[in-house]
């Protein structure tokens, strides 16, 4: 039973990372109908930025965290401006290829700058544990869960209570109407990319103590976040997080209780299952968008 | 009567009140959808404080004119001046900021935002945030039904309520000029009357100038001061609405007057004078 709970917590923590990546994918998809396959690599880049600020420059963890997130916001806007905006209007296929290409590009660049060794940063959560009786839970995993909760709350308040957040939802629902309202649509789209990259950066920094930072960390996690987004209904932000957690938990339990190998295929089994049985996902947002 | 021949492009638009500078002056604009020219050398003016209507059949280019003015389409040629400033190269959001609001055809509400959020999006560019509650009250006095549905998603409203919301949302910008695209589309005659009544009040009480595009020619001519008639992308007639309503061509082709063809003169033989 203790094992089960510990695996459950690890699974939720992993799932939160999936969820945060999927959330970024969904956010971009909802506003611009671009599926960003480089979202996991943006997360990876966030981890390297944090390593640069904390590990190399020796800044305080929280300051380094904040700087990494801010730097990623810039990266997100740059990607939108330089890569995505020029090819909007081309077939979906071109945009998909471009984001896949972006992923390769970011991985190579990261390898060239930071090398191919596994890097790690010291965080306030490294190696610490919380004990509930016999149950021992690692701080780093709990920190991911708590941070995800906080992030979701902040995003919820932003999208529902602020003028800019409401304008972003409006733009994603009806871009033409957003133009008619005088909402600066191009700037809003740029900010959506910034927010997505910031969320990815948070995931990257939180993940740093659990896995190491290396240039391929985003590939597997990024791919596995697509089943999460699909499970959640591809278009629903809470769905992305819930989908991520479900995938993370099932994958971790599969890794613990089943034979070697099941762990890495499990997200894709779920992906196929969802597509076959319930293609609209748990939070069924498919087909709701009026273009 | 003022009938314009095919040399429209070279001719400055006739103005209803030449004394004051018009709030909107469109000169010789041409817009394309891909390779297809949708409007050809259209010129028109909206005098300050007046209602001007553009009449025309489906596909004549009425909506294109409005989209070109509000900046959703860029004209290939020609100039658009709003309050004396050229706006033909500005982005749509800049134009809205200057006080020109567009109520698009088909309402285009934000379906999952609540009615209140839709209205607030209309006020997105406003700097005087404090005046917004007062403006909301004014909207509720125009359309009490919107107040009852404030927290509902706009997609759940009926067509008529969505049209009210679309108009109200544009008014939340406190525009100086309102572009109205087919506000009567798909609505019951009673609702059309209600909405046209509000448009008239907005013009009379708040001094908002209005450019109205309509297929319901009778309603439009009764409401507006000045009218343009557009066919296949060019303006073929321009005059005050009283004189347009008195015109035989307008009666025959836009108001569907029956008495003439009932008496001997066969309708299908009658030719438009501008052809």
Image (tube, grey):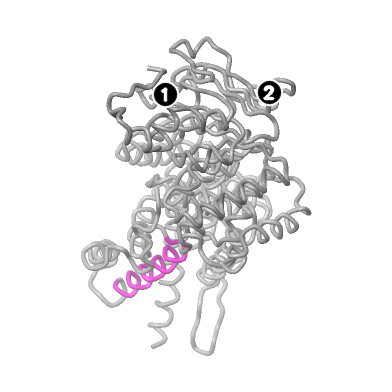
Left or right: where A207 falls relative to B12: left
Image coordinates for residue B233, horizontal then vertical, percent:
42, 23
Image coordinates for residue A269, horizontal then vertical, percent:
24, 65
Tell me the quarter of the image containing the C terminus of chain B: top left
Q: Earlier in the sequence, mark 2 or mark 1?
A: 2
- Along the line of sight, the residue nearer the viewer: A70 or B174: B174
Subunit that carries the residue with mark 1: B
The label on residue B233 is 1
Q: Is disc 1 placed on a helix, strand or loop?
A: loop
Image coordinates for residue B185, horizontal then vertical, percent:
44, 48
Q: Which residue is painted at 40% across and 18% down in the image?
A: B273
Name the residue beneath numbered marker 2: B85
Residue A44 visible in the snapshot? no
- Residue farthest to the front? B263
Quadrant of res B12: top right
* Residue range highlighted in magenta: A236-254
In the depicted structure, whether residue A2 falls above or below residue A170:
below
Question: Does residue B255 belong to the magenta stretch?
Answer: no
In the depicted structure, whether residue B202 falls above or below residue A15:
above
Q: Which residue is painted at 71% across and 57% down in the image?
A: B138
Q: Which residue is painted at 36% across and 62% down in the image?
A: A233
């Amino acid at each position: 039973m203790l094992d089960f709970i510990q695996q459950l917590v690890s699974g939720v923590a992993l799932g939160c990372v999936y969820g945060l990546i999927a959330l970024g994918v969904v956010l971009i998809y909802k506003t611009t109908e671009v599926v960003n396959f480089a979202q996991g690599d943006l997360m990876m880049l966030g981890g390297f930025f944090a390593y640069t600020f904390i590990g190399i420059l020796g800044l305080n963890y929280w300051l380094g965290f904040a700087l990494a997130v801010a730097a990623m916001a810039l990266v997100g806007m740059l990607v939108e401006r330089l890569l995505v905006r020029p090819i909007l209007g081309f077939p979906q296929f071109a945009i998909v290829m471009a984001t896949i290409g972006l992923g390769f590009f970011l991985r190579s660049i990261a390898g060239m700058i930071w090398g191919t060794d596994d890097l790690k940063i010291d965080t306030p959560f490294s190696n610490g544990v919380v004990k509930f009786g016999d149950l021992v839970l690692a701080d780093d995993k709990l920190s991911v869960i708590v941070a995800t909760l906080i992030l979701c709350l902040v995003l919820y308040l932003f999208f529902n209570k602020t003028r800019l957040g409401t304008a972003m939802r409006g733009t994603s629902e009806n871009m033409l109407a957003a133009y008619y309202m005088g909402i600066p649509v191009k700037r809003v789209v740029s900010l959506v990319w910034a927010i997505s990259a910031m969320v990815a950066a948070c995931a990257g920094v939180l993940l740093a103590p659990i896995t190491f930072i290396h240039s391929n960390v985003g590939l597997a996690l990024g791919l596995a976040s697509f089943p999460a987004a699909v499970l959640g209904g591809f278009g629903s932000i809470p769905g992305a997080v819930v989908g991520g957690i479900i995938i993370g938990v099932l994958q971790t339990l599969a890794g613990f209780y089943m034979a070697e190998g099941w762990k890495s295929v499990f997200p894709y089994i779920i992906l196929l299952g969802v597509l076959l049985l319930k293609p609209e996902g748990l939070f069924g947002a498919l087909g709701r968008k009026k273009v | 009567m003022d009938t314009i021949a095919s040399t429209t492009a070279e001719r400055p638009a006739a103005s209803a009140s030449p004394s004051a500078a018009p709030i909107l002056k469109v000169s010789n604009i041409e817009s394309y959808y891909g390779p297809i020219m949708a409007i050809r050398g259209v010129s028109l003016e909206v005098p300050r404080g007046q209602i001007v209507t553009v009449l025309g059949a489906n596909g004549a280019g009425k909506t294109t004119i409005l989209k070109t003015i509000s900046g959703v389409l860029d004209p290939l040629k020609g100039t658009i001046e709003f309050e004396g400033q050229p706006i033909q190269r500005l982005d749509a959001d800049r134009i809205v900021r200057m006080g020109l609001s567009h109520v698009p055809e088909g309402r285009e509400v934000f379906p999952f935002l609540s009615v209140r959020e839709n209205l607030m999006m209309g006020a997105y560019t406003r700097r005087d945030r404090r005046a917004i509650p007062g403006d909301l009250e004014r909207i509720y006095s125009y359309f009490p039904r919107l107040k009852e549905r404030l927290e509902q998603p706009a997609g759940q409203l009926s067509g008529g309520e969505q049209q009210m919301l679309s108009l109200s949302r544009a008014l939340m910008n406190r525009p100086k000029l309102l572009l109205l695209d087919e506000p009567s589309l798909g609505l019951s005659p009673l609702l059309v009357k209600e909405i046209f009544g509000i448009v008239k009040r907005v013009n009379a009480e708040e001094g908002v100038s209005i450019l109205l595009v309509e297929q319901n020619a009778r309603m439009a001519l009764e409401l507006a001061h000045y009218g343009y008639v557009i066919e296949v992308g060019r303006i073929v007639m321009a005059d005050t609405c009283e004189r347009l309503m008195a015109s035989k061509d307008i009666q025959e082709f836009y108001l569907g007057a029956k008495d003439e063809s009932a008496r001997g003169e066969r309708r299908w033989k009658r030719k438009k004078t501008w052809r």
